[in-house]
Amino acid sequence: MSEQRVSEKAVSATLRRLDVEADGSDHFIGQTGQQMGPPRLFGGLVAGQAVVAAARTVPGLQPHSLHAYFLQPGAPGIPIEYTVERLKEGKNFHARSVVGRQQQRTIFSLQASFQRPEPGIAHHDPMPEAPAPDDTPGSGRGFGFGRMGSPLQMRDCDGDLERSAERGDRRMWIKPAAALPEDPVLHLGLLVFASDMSLVMTGTLPHAGLRGRHYGGASLDHAMWFHQLLPFDDWTLYTMRTPAAHGGRPLIEGTMYRRDGTRIVTVMQEGLIRTRRPRS
């Protein structure tokens, strides 16, 4: 199978899972598949599905923020039931609460706010300096399903964590591995999926003693602010830094920029890192 065909199948498999199926009024079912990698579900998939479920109930509006908690580890291969509650139905803003459950276990909760597009003030910090994506080597990291590879192309500007630690931040170019359908909700879902990649690992940058050791990492909560919602169809620079940590909980800040320098998303996440001994 050609590399392009593998990429297309990886993107298709991910979009099938992100595009949750309506199951009655304000109820949706998300399929999880057999994920490659850790035994628990990738949090970005759960967050992406929940956002898609919420967005399907607010046609014509765009998300401007979301706040979520990963409450329990999700299990691959078991569908997730999402219940959407309509918290607000205003003239210009709608708010939604989404709860995800697996076999009666509540594993995830999210609140998201959506706005009807309107003109207004606009500004943003300039995009940090970074080598162009064509000048950056590819990375094999990422989450896939079954034998499929990652639905994202990823290019690490610094090459490894040691160089990122010297800088004090991480810079990574990301883009879909194949063309996406013209459905802005699926573009949103895949962007949220991508936002959870590499964040917890960024929390190890100030701790050289952790690199090369076995440690357990998990996302505790996740927040995003969407400054401009554009098609996720080109290289996007994702920068990450960790300004603080306490009790094994690193705080990670992420920003996403289009190739032309437009800041489109701000991400904040608190993770959990626990050192552990390797299995004998």
Image (cartoon, rainbow, N blue to C red):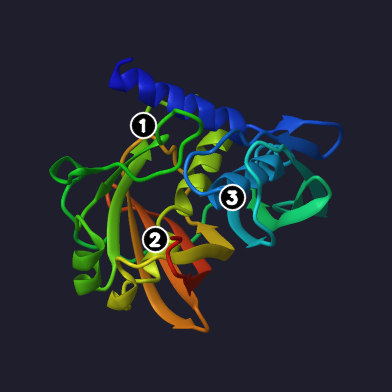
Mark 3 and mark 1 in contact? Answer it, CB < 8 Å. no
Instruction: Look at 52% across and 32% down and name the residue there.
Output: 14
Q: Earlier in the sequence, mark 1 or mark 2?
A: 1
Instruction: Look at 13% across and 44% down and name the residue there.
Output: 135
Q: Quadrant of the N terminus?
A: top left
Look at label 2 and name its amino acid. Answer: Thr
In-front residue for pair 59/159: 159
Q: Which mark is residue 177?
A: 1
Q: Residues within 10 Å of mark 1 (few under 14, many from 20)?
A: many
Select label 2 or label 3 by which is in front. 3
Q: Is 137 rendered above or below residue 276?
A: above
Task: Say which element carries label 2.
Answer: strand
Q: Please give the count of numbered marks on the rendered protein.
A: 3
Instruction: Look at 43% across and 68% down and name the residue there.
Output: 253
Instruction: Residue under label 3, please give it.
Output: 40
What residue occupies the far bottom of the structure in this picture? 246
* Whole-percent x, y for residue 234 in the image: 33, 37
Q: Residues within 10 Å of mark 3 (few under 14, many from 20)?
A: some
Instruction: Residue under label 2, please give it.
Output: 255
Q: Earlier in the sequence, mark 3 or mark 1?
A: 3
* Whole-percent x, y for residue 11 in the image: 45, 29
Look at label 3 and name its amino acid. Answer: Arg
* Whole-percent x, y for residue 51 in the image: 64, 46
In-front residue for pair 112/270: 270
Q: Is residue 220 visible?
A: yes
Select label 3 or label 1 by which is in front. 3
Task: Say which element carries label 3.
Answer: loop
What residue occupies the far top of the structure in this picture? 1
Q: Quadrant of the C terminus?
A: bottom left
